[in-house]
Image (tube, rainbow, N blue to C red):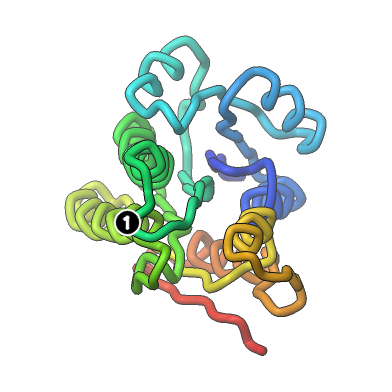
């Protein structure tokens, strides 16, 4: 039985991943933004443990986690949470840049830093659920894509640094996936949302589990997932 700490476990890919792990007997720790969300997640994911820490304020994560009990061992840290606000460079306010960089890049870096000691003990794995935007930036996606390009760089550097400690690092790059975030993106784009056109969260979770369950003599470093339709 392994212990997995997941961000973004409240919906979409993160929620499906948490349920799949719990159903096979693993332990799940969900990081949520506040006490109210913690109560909701405890109801929605029976058997999961909850930690409170606001990814929008990465500088306070160390203090927040120091006030709570962390597992002695963590086999995987899976970064799923993210935010997106579209807009042309000419129109994006600094606050939207700062929010997306904080949640999508700086917070994953800080949370990883804080949990590396326990990940090294277990020779565990860090999984960054990135995005197709982490490989290519389109018009209107500058801030989000910048945060995801940075996340790719973080993963690459971390992989090289932690290889001597036996910690594996994987980046998953899903295409458009049928999640609440995708609905929000379509509203921002002014387009009609049709979930049937996109990858299911279950398919993305299957790729994550493949990376986590891979024997120790191999490592999936980067995996791109695209709609099959």
Point 35% across, 73% down: residue: 136
The number of callouts visible is 1
Extreme top residue here? 67
- Horizontally, residue 49 falls left or right of residue 131, namely right
Which quadrant would residue 33 be assigned to in this image?
top right
Query: Where is residue 102 shown, x and y percent of the image?
Result: 37, 38
Residue 169 screen position, x and y as percent: 35, 57
Whether residue 77 is visible to the viewer of this picture, yes or no, is yes
How far across and how far down the image is residue 1, in percent? 61, 44
Q: Quadrant of residue 90?
A: bottom left
Q: Is residue 154 left or right of residue 225?
A: left
Q: Nearer the viewer, residue 24 or 88?
A: 88
Instruction: Give the side of residue 134 with respect to residue 159, left or right.
Output: right
Q: Which residue is depicted at the point 63% across and 87% down?
A: 228
Residue furthest to the bottom: 229
Viewer-closest of 13 and 133? 133
Viewer-proximal residue among 217 and 110 = 110
Q: Which residue is mark 1?
A: 90
Characterize the local packing of mark 1: few (<14), some (14-19) or many (20 or more) Cα atoms within 10 angstroms: few
Q: From the top left corner, tell me how far across and down residue 133 is, in percent.
A: 41, 67
Q: Secondary structure at mark 1?
A: loop
- Does any portion of residue 120 appear in the rendered image? no
Say which residue appears at 30% left-offset and 61% top-offset: 149
Residue 170, image quadrant = bottom left
Answer above or below: position of 65 versus 5.
above
Q: Quadrant of the C terminus?
A: bottom right
Asked if residue 20 lies left or right of residue 117, the reply is right
Vertical placement of residue 214 versus 108, above or below: below
Residue positioned 41% across, 44% down in the render: 100
Q: Residue furthest front?
A: 90
């Amino acid at each position: 039985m392994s212990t997995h700490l997941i961000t973004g476990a409240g919906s979409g890919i993160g929620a499906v991943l948490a349920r799949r792990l719990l159903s096979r007997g693993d332990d799940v720790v969900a990081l949520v933004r506040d006490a109210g969300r913690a109560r909701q997640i405890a109801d929605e994911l029976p058997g999961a443990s909850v930690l409170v820490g606001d990814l929008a304020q990465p500088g306070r994560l160390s203090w927040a986690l120091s006030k709570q009990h962390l597992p002695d061992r963590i086999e995987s840290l899976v970064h799923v949470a993210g935010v997106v606000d579209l807009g042309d460079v000419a129109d994006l306010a600094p606050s939207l840049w700062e929010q997306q960089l904080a949640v999508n890049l700086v917070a994953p870096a800080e949370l990883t830093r804080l949990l590396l000691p326990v990940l090294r003990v277990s020779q565990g794995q860090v999984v960054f659920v990135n995005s197709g935007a982490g490989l290519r930036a389109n018009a209107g996606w500058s801030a989000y894509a910048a945060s995801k390009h940075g996340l790719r760089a973080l993963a690459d550097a971390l992989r090289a640094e932690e290889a001597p400690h036996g910690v594996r690092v994987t980046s998953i790059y899903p295409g458009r996936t049928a999640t609440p975030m995708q609905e929000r993106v379509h509203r921002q784009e002014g387009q009609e949302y049709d979930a049937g056109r996109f990858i299911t969260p279950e398919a993305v979770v299957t790729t994550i589990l493949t990376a986590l369950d891979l024997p120790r003599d191999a490592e999936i470093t980067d995996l791109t997932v695209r709609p099959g339709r």
